[in-house]
Amino acid sequence: MAVRATVIRFPSDPDAQDSSAVPWGVTVTPFASKDENGNSPVYGSGGDLIPRCENCWAYYNTYCDQDQWAWTCSLCGTLNGLSSETISRYSRPESAPENMSSFIDLEMPLEASEEEDMQARPVYVAAIDLASSDEFLELTKSALLAALEALAPGSLFGLATFSHKLGLYDVQGPIPVVKNVFLPADSDGTLPIELEDAMPLFSFLAPVETCKDRIASALETLRPTSSWDSTGGGQGLDRILLGGRGFGLAMETLISYLGSEHGNTFALARIFAFLSGPPDYGPGQLDTRRYGEQYASKGEDAELALLPEQTPFYKDLAAVAVQAGVCIDILAVTNEYTDLASLKFLSIDSGGSLFLYPNTDDSTLPQDMYRMLTRPYAFNCIMRLRTSTEFKHGNSYGHFFPDPQYENVQHVICCDSYATYAYDFDFANNYGFSRHTAELPMLQLAFQYTVIVPPTETNSKYTLKRRLRIRTMQFGVAHNFNELYDSVDPEVVLSILVHKVILASSSEGVREGRMLLHDWLVILTAQYNEVIKTGVTEYGSSSGSLIDVTFSQCPQLQALPRLVFALLRNPLLRFHEEGIHPDYRIYLQCLFSGLEASSLHRAIYPLLTSYATPDKLAYPRHSLSRAALLTSESPIFFLDAFTTLIVFYSSTADPTLPYPPPHDCLLRREINKVKQERSMTPRLVFIRGGQEDASVFENYLIEEQDVDGSGFSSVMGFVSFLEEISQSVLEYIK
């Protein structure tokens, strides 16, 4: 469980919080195996035995004062009695993990009957769009063959297809058999037959270890609806229905089909929904005409109109999926408008992922499927952040489902070791953290989750283990602005800012999100300059040349102008008229809002390094500008933009340098290391300057691009941006 704060020393009171202009909050990666410093939790049993505060329900921890009969809660200060069993247990401190570490991970016991019920097998279902193309189906087959290699023996796998009908495959016999159920075209239609009647669930869900070859054979039979032979009695009807993509009803029906066995056959089922275009048939169909030329004539703001969902259908369906224990991953391979703004809730609310691949040619879908299924994940998770009494958390951000009954409780139906969430804080009083007490700000995160334990030599069945992970942390208090600014973590600040601008963009439009970000940097710069005593009276010059816009006296803030500039240049916040596809913007929203802070930093401001030869590093970090390329005189550059990795040989590179770099060289080892550590598979591109189109690489050199979105009209992009911020600071302080 990694927890990182925007400031290691918290603001002392509400005035300091407001005046500093630094966001106050944390990012949390709850299922990470280690904390942010690389330490593992202390493991143990007895998760049900930890004492809890009678007032705030916080868990006992190493920061609590304890005497023989009682303990004082480190979060709220309440004195609590100890039971005789706990007194006996705590007389041997080494027997209780909560007395040994503030980071613990404990087994929760199960009743004997409950343990019997909790034996369940992992269930995976592929739902494949047949209103597609041959290329789409070939890519999907490759992805599912990779998935079958990744699935553990004992897993159950179901194969379904959808178009204007829903196909269920029985692959357990010698020849794959498909049963089709027609999907009604009307938007409130229901199926003419229950899926359980069409095919019993246990015929549909096949054991992977015995049916892998038959599943592969069934995949080979898939054909797009456009290639179906429409002959015979149903010719007219089939011709009308060809091309229909009844995604909404197909998902609704599959969730219901699987949900009947939730808690019995499975505790978590995952549906991989392979989609090649917008749902255009039956319940949940989407009107894609809202994307196009009409904004020019209607005067509508495309940035605002295309970001909210057009129907609550998929958000409501996600709530049903959560109740049924079904997690949905949407894997969209399309460059046509699919309205992911409406579809996204189905994946992010149910704990799944949303992937978008604009074409089949260089798609990393098979690698992403394999990677997703081979990493550990927890499910049926409940997360609760508690704080000491002086402050409270305000907004929470991330891919979770808020508890309908309890405030500040989040449900995460499926959580892997990369999934990250964020909270921001406010004071609960007017005076802040008292200077007259030794009490320091505390926070405690409790994360209860379930994991599937594979069969062992002593147990032939899959079993479920319930665990409780608790992290209790203490933070310092900054007694002046210098202390506060010196304790800033710019990557976490970026994370909180990204969440805030996504929220603002979705509700008020991209323009509003950009203004919020720009104004924040202006206010931070003004407040910082006030602190370092340049002072209002000393600004003097109307050019603003005396204003320190680079935070020269505070190393912890120096990265922020570049990060804000890069975020304003990112497709997440660029304008519709610049050619930013609305689905790509939604994909970036979903990706960025679940990334750990260091990964998000890489995605917003890529890392550019240079090499003298494939085996010798020249410079570990360059600014993203042509000037950096020219002044370094290095022949080879490696750019890591999180989803894309580019190796660029300059046009002046010695022709005897091996191209592409050999597999056993230092540069290749670095590339492999980056790919190994990443939550998704980055695309790898090699470019030889002067001989191949270098625009893919040059587009990342953002510091020479105008931040207002007019491309290369200004060769002083970042410098001009700093000058403009300086002028805005002058106007702000006047």
Image: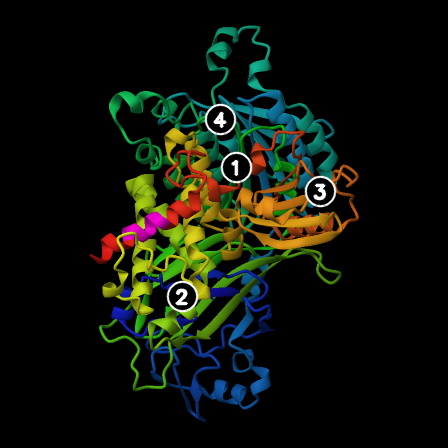
Seen at 49% across and 85% down, the residue is 86
Identify the secondary structure beneath mark 4: loop
Q: Which residue is mark 1?
A: 699
* Number of other residues with Cα within 10 Å of mark 3, as a class: few under 14, some 14 to 19, many 20 or more: some
Residue type of the residue flagged with mark 1 = Asn
- Residue 385 circle label: 2
Distance in Å between CA atoms under marks 2 and 1: 41 Å
Asked which quadrant contains residue 331, the reply is top right
- Along the line of sight, the residue nearer the viewer: 541 or 698: 541
Residue sitting at x 34%, y 25%: 290
Furthest residue toward front: 541
Identify the residue position indicated by label 4 in the image: 277
The vertical placement of 112 against 436, above or below, is above
- The secondary element bearing badge 2 is classed as strand
Q: Please state which of the two labelled residues, at mark 3 or mark 2, is closer to the viewer.
A: 2
Dot 3: what SS?
helix
Q: Position of residue 667 (x, y in %)?
A: 71, 49
Callout 3 amino acid: Glu
Q: Residue at x 46, y 24 (%)?
A: 183
Write down the region rendered in magenta: 723-728
Mark 2–mark 4 contact, CB under 8 Å?
A: no
Q: In the image, what residue type sits under mark 2? A: Leu
Colour convention: rainbow
Magenta region's main secondary structure?
helix
Q: Quadrant of residue 55?
A: bottom left
Q: Residues within 10 Å of mark 4 (few under 14, many from 20)?
A: many
Judging by the rendered image, the residue that carries numbered circle 3 is: 149
Give me the C-alpha separation between circle 1 and circle 4.
28 Å
Q: Quadrant of the C terminus?
A: bottom left
